[in-house]
Amino acid sequence: MQTLISQEQIDHLNKQLLIINDRRKRTIEQYFSKSPREQHEFNNLIDNYVNGVKQFIQEAEKASNVTEAPFVFIGCTVQVKDVNSGEIMEFHVVDPLQGRVEDDNVSYLSPVGRALLLKKVDDEIKVKTPGGNVHYKILAIKFRE
């Protein structure tokens, strides 16, 4: 089955890739300045993300009025279910350099944000966070500007 993407989503993703690459050095300096290992992990995360988004854009079929996102990208809203408690939550995946991280926002640099990137509906993630281990199942992914 061909994945659909709108021109608006393509434009958003292409703009986002330019911003991420432009801010890469600043992000490393601000968040990972003292750890070469973390710098390397961050660069790998960004390289994998950029390559995944570029590949998706090339392979997707263009359509109009697409609100569902085919995978988790920076800027989308993700609805997840806590597998252990059954609680349903929504996260807006954000770039920490683009503004204040609010209650429903999760930075793509956080453990949960990193684990969510490029995942699809029905994928599950297990993440060790400062607050303990979490296990989420992705229920929906929405395009959000």
Image: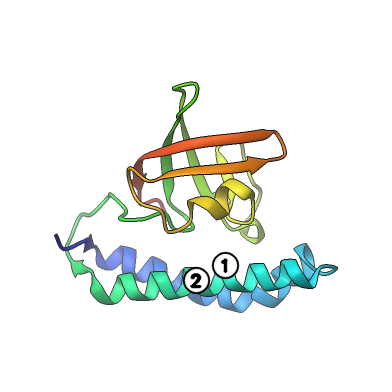
Location of residue 72 by image quarter: bottom left
Residue at (66, 61) in percent of width and height: 97
Q: Is residue 119 left or right of residue 9?
A: right
Q: Is residue 20 left or right of residue 122?
A: right
Which residue has dot 2 on it? 48
Up the image or down, 136 lies above or below 28; here it is above
Residue at (43, 36) in percent of width and height: 80
Location of residue 122 by image quarter: top left
In-front residue for pair 10/49: 49
Q: Sort mark 2 into few (<14), some (14-19) or many (20+) by Cα contacts within 10 Å.
A: some
Q: Position of residue 118 (x, y in %)?
A: 42, 59
SS for dot 1: helix
Q: Quadrant of the C terminus?
A: bottom left
Q: Position of residue 61 (x, y in %)?
A: 18, 68
Which residue has dot 1 on it? 45
- The amino acid type of the residue labelled 2 equals Asn
Up the image or down, 3 lies above or below 91; here it is below
Q: Sort mark 1 into few (<14), some (14-19) or many (20+) by Cα contacts within 10 Å.
A: some
Residue at (53, 52) in percent of width and height: 115
In-front residue for pair 119/76: 119
- The amino acid type of the residue labelled 1 equals Leu
SS for dot 2: helix
Are dots 1 and 2 in contact, CB under 8 Å?
A: yes
In-front residue for pair 129/21: 129
| C-alpha separation, residue under disc 1 versus residue under disc 2 | 5 Å
Q: Quadrant of the N terminus?
A: bottom left
Image coloring type: rainbow
Q: Is residue 107 left or right of residue 1?
A: right
In-front residue for pair 119/16: 119
Q: Position of residue 75 (x, y in %)?
A: 47, 55
